[in-house]
Amino acid sequence: MNDPEVLAFLQKHLQSIQENDLKTYHETTAEGLTLYEWWVTPHRIDGIPFHDFMMSANAKQGTVFGMEGREKDETPIRIDLSNLHIQRYGDAAIASYTLLVSTALPEGVRVASHNESRVMVKVDGAWKVVHVHKSPAWNAPHVSNQ
């Protein structure tokens, strides 16, 4: 069963990223954040400054995360969390899902996806994302496409 409190927090956190809302992003993210973002680098990324730079640059350009080079108002985006599963253990929670990002482009709707896990911990009564792990959503090399 998905925990309503954790789900509301997760949605707020993800929305802050899509809206380049640094204030809310900082409120919902631990300073010691660690991330694995497979399309950026094969190595762990530490801390908030990585996303601060991306979100600040996107805000100045009027774009949103993942759609750099296209204006925000001209590129409607929808986010869905497919197969969402939340595991809560007291003041710690793990959300795992397939993130679906649907984008309305002039040539039609494009849907991008990847698998994602976010680890959240309640610190001083407030939830914070402490770790994110993303991986591609495609068949593993040992799976035949035949």
Image (tube, rainbow, N blue to C red):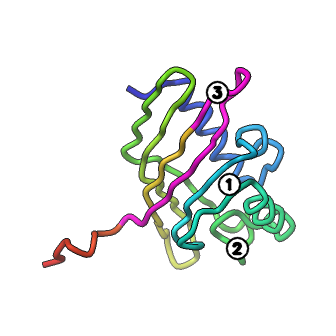
Q: Earlier in the sequence, mark 3 or mark 1?
A: 1
Q: Position of residue 114 (x, y in %)?
A: 45, 61
Which residue bears the numbered disc 2?
68
Observer-side mark, 2 or 3, equals 3
Marks 2/1 in contact by CB < 8 Å: the verdict is no
Q: Position of residue 16 (x, y in %)?
A: 71, 47
Q: Main secondary structure of the magenta part?
A: strand
Q: Secondary structure at mark 2?
A: loop
What residue lies at 12% left-to-right and 78% top-to-bottom? 146
Callout 2 amino acid: Glu
Q: Secondary structure at mark 1?
A: helix
Question: Magenta includes 130?
Answer: yes
Q: Is residue 135 above or below residue 23?
A: below
Disc 2/disc 1 C-alpha distance (Å): 12 Å
What residue lies at 69% left-to-right and 52% top-to-bottom? 17
Disc 2/disc 3 C-alpha distance (Å): 32 Å
Which residue bears the numbered disc 3?
122
Callout 3 amino acid: Lys
The numbered disc on residue 18 is 1
